Image: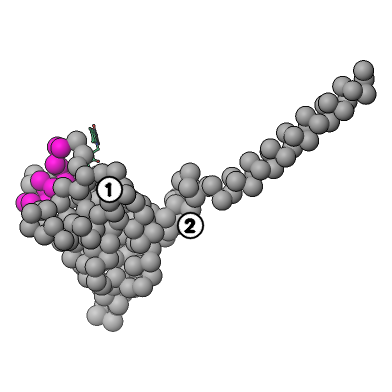
Amino acid sequence: MARAFAEITFTPAVLAEQERQGTAGNYARFLSPEAAPADAIGPAEADFIARRDGFFQATVGENGWPYVQFRGGPEGFLKVLDEKTLAYADFRGNRQYMSVGNLRADGRVSLILVDYPNRRRLKVWGEARIVDIEEDPELIAGLHDRSYRAKPERAIVITVAALDWNCPQHLPQRFTLEELEPALAPLRAELERLRAENAELRRDAAAGAG
Ligand SMILES: Cc1cc2nc3c(=O)[nH]c(=O)nc-3n(C[C@H](O)[C@H](O)[C@H](O)COP(=O)(O)O)c2cc1C
């Protein structure tokens, strides 16, 4: 039971919809004072976040429209600074600055981090702060893996307000090329062995026929 996320997301319209659909009773306990707040990063969340190479980030435009963009990088580029703080180096892209522009006006973000092979996902809500490079070069240096080909333009530092684990329903199992490699390597070796054996058998058969 996670109280903080329900306090953010169970708006009057959401509660009214739960009432209409007959599910309000299932979720009322989320808002009870006894429910765990789930507003800080624990060891399970920290481990999960450290293994991600991307996440979707929603921001809010000044006109109220949500805006979602994917943020990708080397594994673990979204760093846990402490149990209430996440941060990442924000790379140069197409220079439309939609997420950053939104964040200058309203720091609220909603992230979703997905582990496709294990079919797990974590939702995070927070207040983001933009830290420009000139403001804190050391922070950016600590967040950016220099072996990764990207130009960091700023850091985004997020104070976590709520976290919630999602169930795996309808989440497809997907693998990156790197994740598939341990399974593919023995198959490639076996294919090579069988090809060689096949060539040898063909040679023997041709020699026998001759
Ligand atoms: C040269 C270049 C062109 C890009 N064109 C697009 C594009 O047309 N659409 C898009 O969604 N992302 C594009 N990207 C990726 C985005 O720039 C990147 O995801 C960035 O983080 C978007 O930030 P924003 O959505 O907050 O503005 C491009 C990146 C580069 C470097």
Q: Residue at horizontal 53%, vertical 47%?
A: 180
Where is mark 1, residue-wise?
A: 71
Identify whether 60 is placed above or below 191: below
Label 2 sits on a secondary structure element that is loop
- The answer to whether residue 150 is left or right of residue 117 is left
Question: Does the rendering let one see residue 70?
Answer: no
Q: Residue at x 36, y 54 (%)?
A: 75
What secondary structure is found at the residue carrying circle 1? Answer: strand
| Front of the two marks 2 and 1 | 1
Instruction: Identify which residue is drawn at 25% across, 72% down.
Output: 83
Residue 64 lies in the magenta-colored region: no
Q: Is residue 210 left or right of residue 97?
A: right
Relative to residue 88, is residue 42 depicted above or below? below
Residue 128 location (% of width, % of height): 15, 58
- Disc 1 C-beta below 8 A from ligand 1: yes
Instruction: Name the residue nearer the viewer: 39 or 4.
Output: 39
Ligand 1: quadrant of the figure: top left
Task: Report the disc number at residue 118.
Answer: 2
Stretch in magenta: 95-109
Quadrant of the frame with the N terminus: bottom left
| Amino acid tagged 2 | Asn
Q: Residues within 10 Å of mark 2 (few under 14, many from 20)?
A: few
The quarter of the picture where residue 15 lies is bottom left
